Image: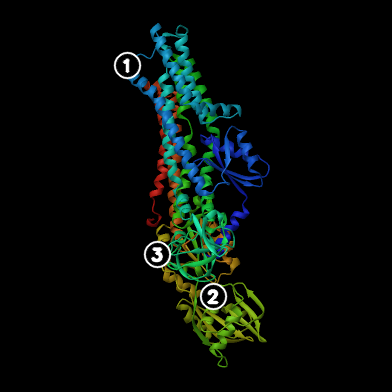
Amino acid sequence: MTEVMMNKLTSNLVSNNTQELIIDGASCASCVGKIEVALKGVPGVDKAEMNFALRTVSVTGKVGVDILIKAIEGIGYNAKSANETSDDELLDEKEVADQKYYASLMKQMWIALGLGVPLMIYSIAGGPMTVETTLERGVWLFIGLLCAAIMYFAGKHFYIGAWKSFVNHSANMDTLIALGTGTAWIYSMVVVFFPMALPEMARHVYFEATAMIIGLIDLGLALEVKARGRTSEAIKRLIGLQAKTARVVRDGKEIDIAIEQVLLNDVVRVRPGEKISVDGVVIQGHTSIDESMLTGEPMPVEKVEEDEVVAGTLNKSGSILFKATRVGKDTALAQIINMVKRAQNSKPPIGRLADAISAYFVPVIMIIAIVSALVWLNFGPDPALAFAVVSATTVLIIACPCALGLATPMSVMVGVGKAAEAGVLIRNGEALQTASKITAMILDKTGTITEGAPKVTDVLIADDKFTKKYILTVASSIESGSEHPLAQAIVDSTIEQGIDPETVTDFQAIAGHGVQAEFNGHQLLFGNQKLMLKNGVALNGFVAMAQSLADEAKTPMYLSIDNKLAAIIAVSDPIKDDSVLAIRRLQANGIRVVMLTGDNRATANAVAKKVGITEVFSEVLPEDKSNKVAELQAQGEIVGMTGDGINDAPALALANVGFAIGTGTDVAIESADITLMRGSLHGLADAIAVSKATLRNIKQNLFGAFIYNVAGVPFAAGLLYPFFGLLLNPVIAGAAMAFSSLTVVSNANRLRLFKPQEH
């Protein structure tokens, strides 16, 4: 992890004034829309996104948490701040709450099914569910009162939720369940008290339906809570990387304190085998540190004085002292956790569609239930009233949109977490979805395909009056002011040879060409052939020599002194070990791979040939990179752009999906949608594979939820009765509704088994 990466991650937190709230009482997809609308209506709120799966909402804007909580309470839900609690405490708290909720639901389920199952068995066995005699009235009255107790003890939360929605002039899943079970119970009690007021055929009680529906829905919710708990495992693993304590030096003594108590600029001791507690800079000692937990790179990294260390990494060999530079929520690991959480909380476009549909779903279903009941009352066979009650109840129960609300967030949570495990940080849900559609991938060469750590390989003297040492002195002096990787290579190579750069004046970088400056009264030009020709520098026969170097995948650069060619310096940037295989993975997935570089044509072609790329654009100026992205988009391509430098930022921003190499500059990372922590191109294929798997999972979930509701509602309304004499039992509808949510959650959890490296 580089310093620029940590700076970027920190800036993300500073730039986004985000509050996270834990919501209590949200039970269905339509709740999401109501909560988001209520929060967006608060002055100062820029954005509000709820994660139905986690029951949390992320609010961006300059507004106090008390005002946000009040807005949520105003529409019938409870809320509390999650920002005041550490991530691990929050997850522990959520886990305890989920366990408590699960135990409560299971208890309620057993209470409800304790009455519902015997009644159901009695009904199936042919026992009369009618009121004909005084004895039957007494028995059913007793059972009705028992059922009322069950409605209170096992189903109270449905009726409270429905009442809150009614008071706030809205409707949700609780409304449907309350209306369905309440209608069945009230009708049955009318039959018990006033049997003679109804036709003989209509004197049927439905107490078993009320009890069974409450029990089955409680069971479905309990199983959903159980399965839902597994989706936050990626966050748990990241949090598990954090040290719990730190050994700090205070008043000349080393003491162990809780990680939360470490202050900025504290001196921290780390012994072999211990985790780095906070981000810092080594001030004493040397060691090797395993950074694989964050970067995926297996080889330990040597650390000496003034080197950066990152929280969560593992000290392998030596004992070191380091000064804390970032603590608490400012550490790189904490920012990574925040990035993953925000991505998990965001919605891809397909998810926003589901939310929009859910907002209208409940009112439409209530209308269908009323229309269905009226049709049965007016046109149905005897007992028409009984048929009307059954159809309306069944429609209300089967249409509960629980599964619809869970379809997207569950998949996104698991998918983003899976990507994070592979060292791929996805910024938002939109990037997650778009990555699956990429048809063309543009790769920068230096630092992306290659190591980005070039070395000087050749120095060809063009003027005999100059020595090699002088040429290298001049070259390193002029390049010491440049941030280009090739410039740094020259400076590093000369320093290794004991040649220190000297001061130059009037330094100027010429984008896409090179640099110019004044050195000890001499005018210097250092760059590509274009720069020389532009300034009228005669190259004579040296162009062919430069070409032969380029054919060997080396980058030749011309140095002129006082407008005369002095030397050609060749630099070679080795190709990353895994670039070839990673590019093959992309091509095997039908993706058009294009290399884009400012390097000369011969060098670019030589590198492209080695890695198996046939489409190459070389000698491209920084401002032209974004033009190439636009050109491919104009051809109908969904373009991914991968880069690591400042000159890549405009192209990264313009591309449909921008991928930044985590070891690159903070500007590139800022402009990108997805960050590859490992610096390996395999991260591209991994990100696309996870994206495709996640989107496929979302579509499966949405299809299942929509088909279930679309097919179930007409069936429940009785459309098949005139043709086949079939009318869906409310109990069957309740069981189907409950287990549809479980199916969605289970399908989303299948992503946990997905291995992106195999795709």
Q: Residue at x 45, y 24 (%)?
A: 394
**Tag 2: amino acid:** Leu
Spatial distance from mark 3 to mark 1, Cα to Cα?
68 Å
Residue nearest the viewer, comparing 514 with 264: 264
Location of residue 505 in the rendering, given as x and y in whole percent from the top left corner: 67, 80
Residue nearest the viewer, comparing 590 with 191: 191
Q: Neighbour class for label 3 at 10 Å: few (<14), some, many (≥20)?
A: some
Q: Nearer the viewer, mark 3 or mark 2?
A: 2
Residue 576, located in which quarter of the rendered image? bottom left
**Tag 3: amino acid:** Leu
**Tag 1: amino acid:** Gly
Residue nearest the viewer, comparing 499 with 472: 499
* Residues at discs 1 and 2 in contact (Cβ within 8 Å): no
Q: Residue 126: which disc?
A: 1
Q: Nearer the viewer, mark 3 or mark 1?
A: 1
Residue picked out by circle 2: 486
Residue picked out by circle 3: 581
- Relative to 609, residue 705 above or below: above
* Residues at discs 3 and 1 in contact (Cβ within 8 Å): no
